[in-house]
Image: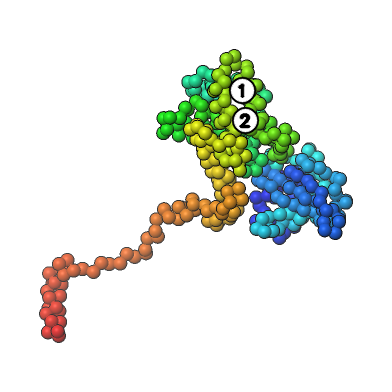
């Protein structure tokens, strides 16, 4: 097991460390002087770290490539509020020297239980066309194997092994709940949209060493891939309604919700609009959860830092609520309440009356 992870950066700021990473990206760039430097992204199961190598680049430039594991020595520092790593030395590691579990994040949830929940939603469908369509996908062993393991994204949300399945099951739960509140929603259509909306990630992303885009993913993106997959599976079902396929296609291409977020079309019917908002909700809540969890592990602050994908700093409201609900400290000795004359013993009431009468002569 590694003794330093990306999530430990705050504890090692301005310190020189020796550790290992997988090279998520490697670029050779020129400096203003014309000399070359290395721009790297180093990764492990807890995140990514921007890194640069300025000196003696010629000695190392050909010794490793993207997706290689490397042992590095360098300085952890902060630039513009973001941690980075200045590499002094590095060397390539052989696969036998590393533990793969240190480098690729993985869901802590039970994959079998998640898969059982997903198939339960599918088997509960009433629409025979939609149920048979999804069953056709599930009958494809290559797709189901990838669906159970693929991440849902490269970095933004559910970016870990099993992330796609985790995200889709969570989204299906939301779809199930929301469709009960809005009777105009076709539950089976919405659930099918949830199943299909990110299925192209099984071909868009590669994740054997680090999470990267495939060439097909870079050139086409998961929405185009999903349209191709839908066309191929629907063609296996004789007589599949063309209008129903058109609705599914719209669910796929509109689920990002806005043109600037990559949707060719805006959601134009109720199930499409709901799919977009619930998908957006689940991805944002996971992004928040992951950052708050990382921050809670390494500091005792209420604020968990800036989330670039959400464009805002995050407050750990749980810490605040824990303080609010804690009972107040009891005082060591409660004060003795003063007795009114009505509460006093008879002899005390008489003495008090005499004192009042004596004081009245002073007025």
Residue situated furthest right in the rendering: 59
In which image quadrant can residue 143 be found? top right
Q: Name above or below for residue 118 compared with residue 39.
A: above
Q: Name above or below for residue 128 compared with residue 164.
A: above
Indicate the quadrant containing the N terminus: top left, top right, bottom left or bottom right. Answer: top right
Q: Along the polypeptide, which appears first: circle 1 or circle 2?
A: 1
Residue pictured at 77% horizontal, 53% vertical: 52
Question: How dense is the environment of label 1, judged by Cα within 10 Å: few (below 14), some, or many (20 and up)?
Answer: many
Q: Callout 1: helix, strand or loop?
A: helix
Question: CB atoms at circles 1 and 2 under 8 Å apart?
Answer: yes
Residues 36 and 255: in front is: 255
Indicate the quadrant containing the C terminus: top left, top right, bottom left or bottom right. Answer: bottom left
Q: Name above or below for residue 262 compared with residue 352.
A: above
Q: Position of residue 231 (x, y in %)?
A: 63, 23
Query: Which label number is shown at residue 137?
Result: 1
Question: How dense is the environment of label 2, judged by Cα within 10 Å: few (below 14), some, or many (20 and up)?
Answer: many
Residue pictured at 86% horizontal, 55% vertical: 35
Q: Position of residue 222 (x, y in %)?
A: 65, 33
Q: Position of residue 270 (x, y in %)?
A: 48, 33
Residue pictured at 57% horizontal, 30% vertical: 250
Q: Name above or below for residue 95 compared with residue 115.
A: below
Residue pictured at 51% horizontal, 35% vertical: 273
Tell me the residue that label 2 is attached to: 199
Q: Position of residue 92 (x, y in %)?
A: 82, 44
Q: CA distance from mark 1 to mark 2?
A: 10 Å
Query: Which label number is shown at residue 255?
Result: none
Residue 308, can we see it? yes
Residue 113, can we see it? no
Instruction: Tell me: 34 left or right of 52.
Output: right
Q: Callout 2: helix, strand or loop?
A: loop
Colour option used: rainbow
């Amino acid at each position: 097991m590694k003794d330093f992870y990306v999530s430990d950066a705050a504890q090692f700021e301005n310190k020189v460390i020796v550790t290992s990473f997988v090279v998520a990206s490697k670029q050779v760039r020129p400096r203003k002087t014309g000399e070359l430097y290395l721009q790297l992204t180093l990764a492990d199961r807890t995140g990514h770290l921007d890194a640069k190598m300025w000196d003696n680049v010629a000695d190392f430039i050909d010794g490793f490539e993207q997706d290689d594991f490397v042992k590095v020595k360098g300085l952890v520092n902060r630039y513009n509020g973001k941690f980075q790593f200045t590499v002094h030395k590095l060397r390539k590691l052989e696969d036998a020297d590393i533990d793969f579990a240190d480098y690729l994040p993985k869901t802590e949830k039970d994959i079998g239980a998640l898969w059982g929940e997903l198939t339960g939603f599918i088997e509960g469908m009433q629409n025979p066309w939609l149920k048979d369509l999804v069953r056709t996908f599930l009958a494809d062993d290559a797709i189901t194997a990838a669906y159970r393991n693929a991440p849902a994204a490269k970095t933004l949300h559910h970016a870990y092994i099993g992330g796609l399945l985790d995200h889709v099951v969570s989204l299906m739960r939301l779809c199930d709940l929301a469709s009960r509140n809005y009777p105009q929603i076709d539950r089976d259509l919405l659930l099918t949209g949830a199943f299909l909306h990110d299925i192209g990630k099984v071909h868009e992303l590669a994740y054997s060493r680090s999470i990267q885009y495939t060439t097909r993913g870079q050139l086409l993106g998961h929405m185009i891939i999903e349209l191709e997959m839908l066309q191929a599976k629907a063609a296996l079902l004789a007589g599949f309604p063309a209008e129903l396929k058109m609705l599914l296609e719209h669910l796929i291409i509109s689920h990002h919700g806005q043109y600037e977020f990559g949707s060719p079309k805006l959601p134009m019917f109720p199930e499409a609009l709901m799919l977009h908002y619930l998908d957006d909700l689940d991805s944002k809540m996971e992004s928040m959860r992951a950052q708050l969890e990382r921050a809670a592990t390494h500091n005792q602050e209420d604020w968990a830092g800036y989330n670039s994908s959400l464009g805002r700093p995050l407050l750990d409201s749980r810490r605040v609520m824990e303080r609010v609900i804690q009972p107040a400290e009891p005082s060591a000795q409660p004060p003795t309440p003063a007795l009114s004359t009505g509460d006093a013993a008879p002899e005390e009431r008489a003495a008090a009356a005499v004192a009042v009468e004596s004081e009245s002569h002073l007025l």
